[in-house]
Structure formats: C-alpha cells, structure tokens
Amino acid sequence: MYREHTIGVVIPAYNEKGFVGDVIREMPEYVDRLYLVDDCSTDGTWDEIREAAREDAARLDDAVLKYDERLQPTDPKAMADGGAASVLDQRAVVHESIGRVVPIQHRENRGAGGAIKTGYLAALADEVDIVPTVDGDGQMDLSQLPKLLDPIVEDEADYAKGNRLLYKEYRSDMPRFRFVGNAILTFLTKIASGY
C-alpha cells in the first residue's frame, strides 16, 4: 500500500530476458501487485518472470506484504466472470500469483499498448486503486514512482505521466532510435491531449 491506496504496476514485456527480472526484484515494497504481461516473447522472458517472481516472494515475507482486505491473491479461475475479466480471458492466460506477481501470457502478440491494456484489465478485475506502468527493459528509475503517485493520491490529478526524455541522465543509455520514437510519441500525445 502507498498512502492507504493499493498499487498495481503493469509491466509489459517482449523479449526482455536479462532485464525484466531486475525490474521485478527492484520494485518498491509498497507496490501490492505486479502485472507482468509477456507479449509472446521468444527469448526466455517468461522463465525469467517466473524465477524473479519466486525470488521476490521469498524476499518479501507476509509481514511486509500488507494487502488491502479487498486485494486478495489473484485467482485466475475467479477472473472468468464478466466485465474486464471476461475480455482479459479472451486476450491472455492469467496464471496464479507468485507472491505479489501476477504472471500473464498473451495468446498472441499485441504490442506494448496491447500488453498495457491487458495489465489494466487484470488490475481492474482485482479492483486496484492506482495502476502505473513500468517498462520491462529496466530503463525507468523506480525511485521516481512517488512523483507519479502523489498527485493522484492527493486528488490533484486523475492521471500522471513521467517523461524521462526531459533529463539527459535518464535518456543517456537509451538507443537513439528509441529516443527519437519516444520523442515523437510524446509530442503526439501532447497534441492529442491538448497539453
């Protein structure tokens, strides 16, 4: 829990072997759920997700994981009933939780946006309060999460988005093609949102 709110982080992953495990292991303890969406990876990402989830569960004992009473361990069988869960069932296989990690496998590759949507549907079915997204490539600074969560918790915003492109130290390791693509998408998002 973070300031009396349940937090479920959606982590889309496609061929992120060697990176996604670190994202799971480095996730702050106040995060209640990690929705790991494997988008039909071909490189061992799925095995790394499950292994890192087991390590994370072993590291965090029950005394640390204080879930809201509403937030019970994800039960994939219970998700088969109506609404978001029904749509989710058509898109992906939701596996039983490993500690706070909910491993999800897409039935077909849907891209990053599709993986994020799948994670949002799982979080909606679990009735999580706040759902940030973190890429599976390990390029995001997880210590910055409170900067996104605080405006929402304080009812100053309904949505918050970080922009690592603004700071040279956060984009220095980013491949040039990814930087250009992200810059274009950020610009288009600003236009579409009226920002």
Image: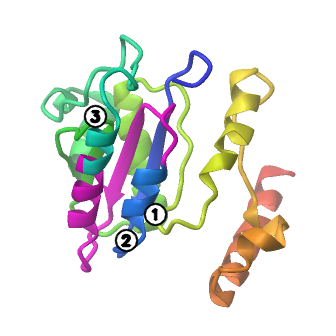
Q: Which amino acid lies under the numbered mark 3 shown in the image of this protein?
A: Ala
Q: What numbered label is drawn on residue 136? A: 1
Q: Which amino acid lies under the numbered mark 1 shown in the image of this protein?
A: Gly
Residue at the image position 22 percent from the left and 38 percent from the top: 97
Instruction: Residue 15: give x, y in percent of width and height.
Output: 35, 76
Instruction: Residue 183: give x, y in percent of width and height.
Output: 76, 74
Q: Is residue 91 shown to the viewer in this render? A: no
* Nearer to the camera, 2 or 82: 2
Q: Earlier in the sequence, mark 1 or mark 3?
A: 3
Q: Which amino acid lies under the numbered mark 2 shown in the image of this protein?
A: Tyr
Mark 2–mark 1 CB contact (< 8 Å): yes
- Magenta part of the chain: 27-54
- Please give left or right for residue 64 compared with residue 86 in the image: right
- Density class for disc 3 (Cα within 10 Å; few <14, some 14-19, many ≥20) is many
Residue at the image position 63 percent from the left and 81 percent from the top: 178
- Density class for disc 1 (Cα within 10 Å; few <14, some 14-19, many ≥20) is many
187 is higher (above) or lower (below) than 43: above
Q: What numbered label is drawn on residue 85? A: 3
Tag 1, which secondary structure? Answer: loop
Instruction: Residue 60: give x, y in percent of width and height.
Output: 35, 35
Residue at the image position 28 percent from the left and 69 percent from the top: 45
Q: Earlier in the sequence, mark 2 or mark 1?
A: 2
Residue 18 belongs to magenta span: no
Q: Quadrant of residue 74?
A: top left
* C-alpha gap between disc 2 and disc 1: 8 Å
Q: What numbered label is drawn on residue 14? A: 2
Tag 3, which secondary structure? Answer: helix
